[in-house]
Image (cartoon, rainbow, N blue to C red):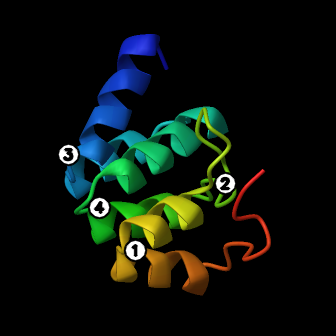
Protein backbone atom coordinates (compact mmCIF):
# COMPACT_ATOMS: atom_id res chain seq x y z
CA UNK A 1 0.00 0.00 0.00
CA UNK A 2 1.01 3.55 -0.63
CA UNK A 3 1.67 6.19 2.01
CA UNK A 4 -1.76 7.64 1.17
CA UNK A 5 -3.38 4.24 1.85
CA UNK A 6 -1.62 3.94 5.19
CA UNK A 7 -2.66 7.47 6.12
CA UNK A 8 -6.28 6.80 5.14
CA UNK A 9 -6.28 3.56 7.13
CA UNK A 10 -4.91 5.30 10.22
CA UNK A 11 -7.38 8.17 9.86
CA UNK A 12 -10.32 5.76 9.54
CA UNK A 13 -9.15 3.98 12.69
CA UNK A 14 -8.79 7.26 14.57
CA UNK A 15 -12.23 8.46 13.48
CA UNK A 16 -13.86 5.20 14.56
CA UNK A 17 -14.91 3.90 11.15
CA UNK A 18 -14.90 0.10 11.57
CA UNK A 19 -16.25 -0.70 8.10
CA UNK A 20 -13.47 1.31 6.44
CA UNK A 21 -10.82 -0.19 8.73
CA UNK A 22 -12.13 -3.67 7.96
CA UNK A 23 -11.96 -2.96 4.21
CA UNK A 24 -8.34 -1.81 4.49
CA UNK A 25 -7.48 -4.90 6.54
CA UNK A 26 -8.50 -7.05 3.56
CA UNK A 27 -5.36 -5.78 1.82
CA UNK A 28 -1.85 -6.61 2.97
CA UNK A 29 -0.86 -3.78 5.30
CA UNK A 30 2.53 -3.77 6.92
CA UNK A 31 2.49 -4.37 10.68
CA UNK A 32 3.75 -0.83 11.31
CA UNK A 33 0.59 0.58 9.72
CA UNK A 34 -1.54 -1.55 12.04
CA UNK A 35 0.52 -0.45 15.04
CA UNK A 36 0.26 3.21 14.05
CA UNK A 37 -3.51 2.81 13.71
CA UNK A 38 -3.70 1.20 17.15
CA UNK A 39 -1.76 4.05 18.74
CA UNK A 40 -3.97 6.57 16.89
CA UNK A 41 -7.13 4.91 18.18
CA UNK A 42 -6.06 4.79 21.81
CA UNK A 43 -5.09 8.47 21.72
CA UNK A 44 -8.76 9.24 21.17
CA UNK A 45 -10.61 9.74 24.44
CA UNK A 46 -13.56 7.83 23.02
CA UNK A 47 -11.64 5.07 21.26
CA UNK A 48 -13.91 3.05 19.00
CA UNK A 49 -14.05 -0.38 20.59
CA UNK A 50 -15.08 -2.03 17.31
CA UNK A 51 -11.96 -0.64 15.63
CA UNK A 52 -9.81 -1.85 18.54
CA UNK A 53 -11.26 -5.35 18.17
CA UNK A 54 -10.54 -5.36 14.44
CA UNK A 55 -6.94 -4.30 15.02
CA UNK A 56 -6.47 -6.99 17.68
CA UNK A 57 -7.85 -9.62 15.30
CA UNK A 58 -5.46 -8.35 12.62
CA UNK A 59 -2.63 -8.89 15.11
CA UNK A 60 -1.59 -5.31 15.70
CA UNK A 61 1.26 -5.29 18.19
CA UNK A 62 -0.36 -4.73 21.58
CA UNK A 63 2.90 -3.42 23.02
CA UNK A 64 3.66 -0.98 20.20
CA UNK A 65 4.87 2.37 21.47
CA UNK A 66 4.18 5.97 20.66
CA UNK A 67 6.95 8.54 20.29
CA UNK A 68 7.19 8.91 24.10
CA UNK A 69 7.53 5.16 24.68
CA UNK A 70 3.99 4.72 26.01
CA UNK A 71 2.05 1.55 25.17
CA UNK A 72 -1.66 1.47 24.29
CA UNK A 73 -2.38 -0.06 27.70
CA UNK A 74 -0.61 2.79 29.47
CA UNK A 75 -2.41 5.40 27.36
CA UNK A 76 -5.89 3.97 27.93
CA UNK A 77 -5.37 3.38 31.63
CA UNK A 78 -3.97 6.89 32.19
CA UNK A 79 -6.94 8.37 30.32
CA UNK A 80 -9.38 6.35 32.41
CA UNK A 81 -10.76 4.60 29.34
CA UNK A 82 -11.90 1.49 31.19
CA UNK A 83 -13.49 -0.29 28.24
CA UNK A 84 -10.45 0.08 25.99
CA UNK A 85 -8.17 -0.92 28.88
CA UNK A 86 -10.31 -3.99 29.53
CA UNK A 87 -10.18 -4.95 25.84
CA UNK A 88 -6.39 -4.64 25.80
CA UNK A 89 -6.08 -6.84 28.89
CA UNK A 90 -8.49 -9.41 27.42
CA UNK A 91 -6.42 -9.38 24.22
CA UNK A 92 -3.40 -10.33 26.39
CA UNK A 93 -1.53 -7.03 26.36
CA UNK A 94 1.60 -7.40 28.47
CA UNK A 95 0.87 -5.81 31.84
CA UNK A 96 4.60 -5.45 32.49
CA UNK A 97 5.16 -3.43 29.30
CA UNK A 98 3.38 -0.32 30.52
CA UNK A 99 6.28 2.05 29.92
CA UNK A 100 9.90 2.18 28.74
Q: What number is the disc on residue 73?
A: none
- Looking at this rendering, what residue extends furthest in the front direction? 78
For the point 42% across and 70% down, which residue is it?
A: 53
| Sequence-first tag of 3 and 2 | 3
Whether the residues at callouts 1 and 4 have beta carbons within 8 Å, the answer is yes
> Where is mark 4, residue-wise?
47
Q: Nearer the viewer, mark 4 or mark 2?
A: 4
> Where is mark 3, residue-wise?
15
- Element type at mark 2: loop
| Sequence-first tag of 4 and 2 | 4
Alpha carbon separation for disc pair 3 and 1: 15 Å
Residue 32 lies, with reference to residue 55, above or below; the image says above
Q: Nearer the viewer, residue 87 or 55?
A: 87
Question: Crowding at label 2, few (<14), some or many (≥20) Cα neighbours within 10 Å?
Answer: some
Alpha carbon separation for disc pair 1 and 4: 7 Å
Dividing the picture into quadrants, the one containing residue 7 is: top left
> Where is mark 2, residue-wise?
61
For the point 40% across and 64% down, which residue is it?
A: 52
User: In this orientation, does residue 30 appear?
Assistant: no
> Where is mark 1, residue-wise?
84
| Left or right placement of residue 32 versus residue 53 in this view | right
- Element type at mark 1: helix
For the point 20% across and 45% down, which residue is it?
A: 15
User: In this orientation, does residue 89 appear?
Assistant: yes
Dividing the picture into quadrants, the one containing residue 23 is: top left
Whether the residues at callouts 3 and 1 have beta carbons within 8 Å, the answer is no
| Sequence-first tag of 4 and 3 | 3
Q: Nearer the viewer, residue 31 or 39?
A: 39
Amino acid sequence: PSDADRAAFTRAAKLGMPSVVEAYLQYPLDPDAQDLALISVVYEETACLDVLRLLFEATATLECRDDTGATPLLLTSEDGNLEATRLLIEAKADLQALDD
